[in-house]
Image (cartoon, grey):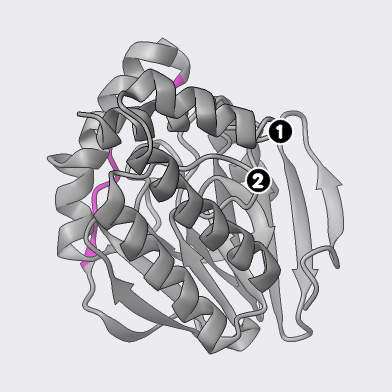
Amino acid sequence: MNKTTFKSVTLAKGELNIYDFDSVKLHAYKTNDFIDDEVFIVEKNGNAVIIESPCFFDNSKELTDYLKDVNVCGMLIAYHGAGAAFLPDVPKYATKNAVSYSENGGGKVLINNFTNAFGEIFDNSVHKITNIIEPGNITIGGIDFIIKQTNEAFDIEIPEINAVYTHMLGHDCHSIVAGTEHADAMISEIRSYIEKGFDLILTSHYTPEDLKDAETKIAYLENLKQIAADCRNADEFKSKVEEQYPQYSGQNYLDMTAEFFFA
């Protein structure tokens, strides 16, 4: 499946790119919110499983309306625990470490920061997980998934469409990189996607990407490490990164990355 082979549906705020795999459809919801969230709906035989949740109230309402004729069988909540007003009665699935991440860990810190930044339009309530899952195979609504636990939460392979979901990629935007070791871990993970030959890479903050994009991201991360090694402080680091990647979005992510490298 080519990442540009889709049908588009424009909503009042967000938009959907719909990929048709015959027996399975992937609805990629671009929220157009302040943090560029993406939500993914995997649909098969009238049933659907949602990956992640919108966390602004207006997105929650319009995506609920979009799904009114679909039987939503479950929601996989990995890195984005906020937005509990969205489909509150649908079963929520997560690993134990993902629950901890959203309720007490780094995810909770981000929720607090976003609450301070965006105020009442941001739904800071955390989804109540009804089903704790383990790494490995799981079937929800007749759709097969493979859960891979990560340090923070979990990634998701979707065999029927040869796709994988992870938190961040973004071939032409900055990412939150928590130092050299984290960069190396990201590179290792992305290389595993290339080795497995996924058609699509789905992430929380970008439209679906492919393996060419994965190669681009690896080169960026390797260069980021080198730039950091040659710099004395965060400001110098940011300046050099901006000079080499002038078209990249995600300035707030670069700010956080600089703080991690030069804590």
Q: Which residue is mark 1?
A: 247
SS at mark 1 in the image: loop
Q: Examine the image and state in which quarter residue 181 appears.
A: bottom left
- Comparing 46 with 26, the one in front is 26
Q: Note whether 251 is above or below 129 in the view shown.
A: above
Of residues 257 and 82, the one nearer the viewer is 257
Which residue occupies 47% across, 17% down? 121
Compare marks 2 and 1 and give the one earlier in the sequence.
2
Task: Report whether residue 261 is seen.
Answer: yes
Q: Amino acid at mark 2?
A: Asp
Q: Quadrant of residue 45?
A: bottom right
Give the left or right position of residue 180, taking residue 18 as reference.
Answer: left
Let me know if residue 225 is in the magenta part: no
* 3D distance between C-alphas at marks 2 and 1: 7 Å
Residue 242, horizontal then vertical, whole percent: 58, 28
Assign a secondary structure to mark 2: loop
Instruction: Name the main secondary structure of what is drawn in magenta.
Output: loop
Residue flagged by tag 1: what amino acid is it? Gln
Q: Could you classify mark 1 by the number of other residues whose Cα lies within 10 Å: few (under 14), some (14-19), or many (20 or more)? A: few
Instruction: Name the residue located 78 percent from the left edge and 37 percent from the top edge.
Output: 11
Where does label 2 land, which residue?
172
Q: Few, some or many C-alpha atoms within 10 Å of disc 2 (few <14, some 14-19, many ≥20)?
A: some
Work out whether 53 lies above or below 144.
Answer: above
Visible residue check, residue 84:
no
Q: Which residues are magenta?
A: 122-131
Residue 163 in the image: state x and y as whole percent: 58, 76
Residue at 56 percent across and 80 percent down: it is 194
* Proximity of marks 2 and 1: CB atoms separated by less than 8 Å: yes
In the rendered structure, the answer to whether residue 52 lies left or right of residue 62 reads left
